[in-house]
Amino acid sequence: MGIPRRLLPPTAMLLAFEAAARTGNFTQAAQELNYTQSAISRQIRSLEERLGTELFVRGRQRVILTRAGVSYARSISDALRHISEASLSVQANPHALSLRLAMLPSFGSRWLIPKIHMFLGQNPDVSLNFSARAVPFDFESEPFDCAIHYGPLTWTGTESVRLMGESVVPVAGAKLLARYRFERPEDLLKAPLLVLSSRVGSWQRWFERNGVAYDQEEGLMFDQFDALVAAAEVGLGIALVPRFLFAAEIDSGALVPVIDTDTPSEHAYHLVWPQDRRDNSTMKLFRDWLCQQSRLFAGAEPATVCRPRLAEPLLVC
């Protein structure tokens, strides 16, 4: 069933509202869109009448979004951005089959991107659109065809395939190693520990697997591995990282394993997609290629597609 036209305000109204919401000023919005200030005001008033609610509280020098306006602005801004990205993709390669992929920043830049030329060489008609996502999201609000995820599978309405596991190793820079002497896992308790916000509790699991009781507060927190590793390199603390992602830094000596023993992580990397896109031929091409690369890398058994079991929103961490 199509979307009712009454729920689709004209683009001019939406552009005027988005610009005014972002700038907080009808005059600035008019200058940006090359409209008059009165034209912006009319477009927004017409939009409010169409929606049956006020979107702004008007002041003498500035306008302020109402509660409804804040929510609507967020959704409209995302929708306009998605339309812009889709238009740009078509312009860049009008004959391509497109695939929109959400990927973990470090896994994407360090493992996937160096290999992606092989996929594109085999599938020259495919256009890939990459977006880094290090925080949770759901497929209902963002128009991705699939996502690379690390962690437990606890969502409804999706399917997934396991790509690979990982092992982690505690690493530090030369400055910190000069201040401490590490010989056994329990020696790490003397030094500051660095934490990835999407993997809170990873240090506790590492100590438990290495036979050490751990009940301390975790230390400095980062939202991406690259920032975490940069902090370790300059001596701010010890980072617990997947060795395969940071082999270059370890091989160069920028990072030094504090205890040179790899510990298997609790979870694994997966490719996840909504059930209603399981028949997307481009996604299936990418899935099959990615599974092949993962098996070559990890020496794993053939991948098995998993069906969802728990009724919770999709999270990609």
Image (spheres, rainbow, N blue to C red):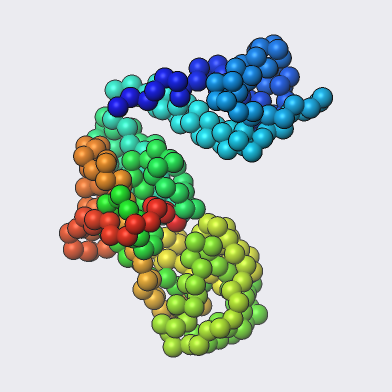
The answer to which of 205 and 55 lies nearer the viewer is 55
Q: Residue at x 33, y 24 (%)?
A: 2
Identify the image quadrant of residue 85: top left
User: Which residue extends farthest front?
Assistant: 52
The answer to which of 23 and 71 lies nearer the viewer is 71
Q: Position of residue 6 (x, y in %)?
A: 45, 20
Q: Residue at x 55, y 25 (%)?
A: 51
Q: Residue at x 53, y 31 (%)?
A: 76
- Quadrant for the N terminus in the image: top left
Q: Position of residue 104 (x, y in %)?
A: 43, 52
Identify whether 288 is placed above or below 28.
below
Asked if residue 310 lies left or right of residue 17, the reply is left
The answer to which of 220 and 49 lies nearer the viewer is 49
Asked if residue 220 lies left or right of residue 294, the reply is right
Any part of residue 220 in sight: yes
Q: Position of residue 100 (x, y in %)?
A: 37, 38
Any part of residue 296 in sight: no
Q: Position of residue 68 (x, y in %)?
A: 60, 35
Q: Residue at x 79, y 27 (%)?
A: 59
Identify the image quadrant of residue 53: top right
Identify whether 257 is placed above or below 106.
below
User: Which residue extends farthest left?
Assistant: 302
Q: Number of callouts in the render?
A: 0
- Quadrant for the C terminus in the image: bottom left
